[in-house]
Image (cartoon, rainbow, N blue to C red):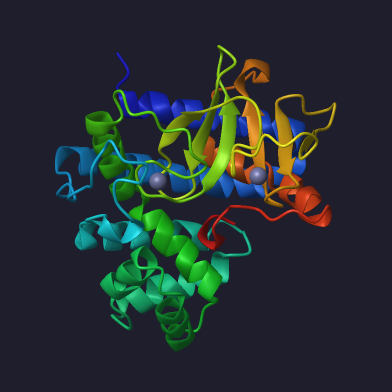
Amino acid sequence: MLNATTKQLQAIQSAAEAIVARRPAYRQLMAFYGDLFQLQTAMGERVAADPPPLPEFGETDRSLPLISPRDFAINGDRAAELLKSVSRRAETSGSDLADDARTIAEALEGERFEPREAFGALLQDRWEVLGSIAEQIGVKAATLSFFTYHSLLPELRHTAERLAKRTMDGRNWRQGHCPVCGTPPALSLIDAGGERHLLCGFCWEKWRVARAGCPLCRSAERGAHTYFYSDAEPEYRVEACDACKRYVKTVDTRCLNRPFYGPLEAVATLHLDLQATEKGYDGTLPGYLK
Ligand SMILES: [Zn+2]
Ligand SMILES: [Zn+2]
């Protein structure tokens, strides 16, 4: 009998292989993310066994998110351990991040920066702090925030899942930002029954929204909501809105011949972000996910 973690890893692996089979240009990226998700999934099991404390949250009957990103409690030792193993793994990935990854791992091992300071800065949206740590150790700020975010993700996921389980029942949330932490979505998906959901760009919580109109600003203005897609990729489309000038990438899981794994689909569709940006729309994807 396979345990849940093994099953999830196999699903991620087969999704990554299916993506590479169709778009060989993504081979290196998928290999890199495959390793990253594997380390995160294994850490997720440890987080589940010893979860961080649940933050206090607001009224669930109001139309406000329960908490803000800064309210997530995390276990700094565990996240630092993941930061080290993720950077060490990325160092040999052959990706663009390899050199910076090695520098981050060496700086951590040489105690040249305090990882807790980086975690706090990411949660509090204090980019100037991340920027100065990056400068001090000699890496790009974008790389440091990318690794910092991914080291926190197993902690964030676990807290978001528990909060959602406690509060989502009967909560009529249809907004264009996350009901748990208020962040805009990284992705939208259509489920087997044709319902639309959004996936948070910070904690990856999923919530259902109306099928029609712009999922981000909820504008139903006639003609303001357009989409584009490619015949070669029937499972993807980009939905763009002329009312809020933003777009969101949608995965129609009814056309998907592989397991759906949100974080993987978000990076397997970077070519769509380019197209949407060229057409003059703004993305909702935060910098640490690009
Ligand atoms: Zn969220
Ligand atoms: Zn809109």
Residue at position x 40%, y 80% from top?
129
- Residue 171: image location, x then y, percent: 33, 29
Q: Give the total of numbered labels.
A: 0
Above or below, 6 relative to 270: above
Q: Quadrant of the N terminus?
A: top left
Above or below, 232 relative to 90: above
- Left or right, 258 with reference to 223: left
Above or below, 230 relative to 272: above
Q: Quadrant of the C terminus?
A: bottom right
Q: Which of the four quarters of the rendered structure image does ligand 2 lie in?
A: top right
- Residue 178: image location, x then y, percent: 43, 43
- Left or right, 216 with reference to 27: left
- Left or right, 163 with reference to 208: left
- Residue 204: image location, x then y, percent: 43, 41
- Residue 185: image location, x then y, percent: 53, 44
The image quadrant that residue 165 belongs to is top left
Q: Residue furthest bottom?
A: 136
- Quick check: can you spot residue 216? yes
The image quadrant that residue 173 belongs to is top left
- Quick check: can you spot residue 261? no
Above or below, 131 relative to 196: below
- Left or right, 190 with reference to 280: left
Q: Residue furthest front?
A: 221
